[in-house]
Image (cartoon, helix red, strand yellow):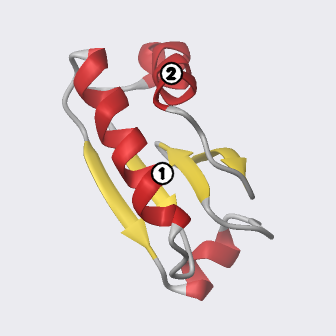
Amino acid sequence: MKIEILDTGSALCKTLLSNALEAIRESGKSGRVVVVRDIKRIMRYGVLATPALVIDGVVMFSGRMGSPEEILSLLHQNLSTIVV
């Protein structure tokens, strides 16, 4: 599973990163979390506001913060497509 945190350097990035790591721990699955700050890579996703959360190449949300519980729910919804 690959989780990307798309961010241009805001303080919210650290919180979203922490929330994503907590959600992965709670899910019991392994995964890789990457912070993407390259604006060209961010633009390829069509994201207009950061921070944004991407799971296995799919933008889950952008322009807001996600709680660990929300991210965990998104992980569970996507488990059928995630190869661990």
Marks 1 and 2: CB-CB under 8 Å? no
Characterize the local packing of mark 1: few (<14), some (14-19) or many (20 or more) Cα atoms within 10 angstroms: many
Instruction: Locate residue 50, reporting x and y percent.
Output: 67, 67
Q: Is residue 40 rendered to the left or right of residue 64?
A: left
Residue at the disc numbered 2? 69
The answer to which of 42 and 70 lies nearer the viewer is: 70
Specify which label sits upstream in the sequence, 1 or 2. Answer: 1
- Quarter of the image for residue 67 reads top right
Instruction: Locate residue 63, reporting x and y percent.
Output: 75, 58
- Secondary structure at numbered mark 1: helix
Label 1 and label 2: CA atoms lie apart by: 12 Å
Q: Is residue 19 rendered to the left or right of residue 59?
A: left
Q: What is the residue that sits farthest to the right in this orientation?
A: 48
Could you tell me the amino acid type at mark 1?
A: Leu
Label annotation for residue 72: none
Q: Which residue is drawn at 39% across and 53% down?
A: 17
Instruction: Locate residue 38, reporting x and y percent.
Output: 50, 85
Instruction: Locate residue 72, reporting x and y percent.
Output: 46, 22
Residue at the disc numbered 1? 16
- Secondary structure at numbered mark 2: helix
Q: In this view, does 80 lie above or below 50?
A: above
Quadrant where the N terminus is found in the figure = top left
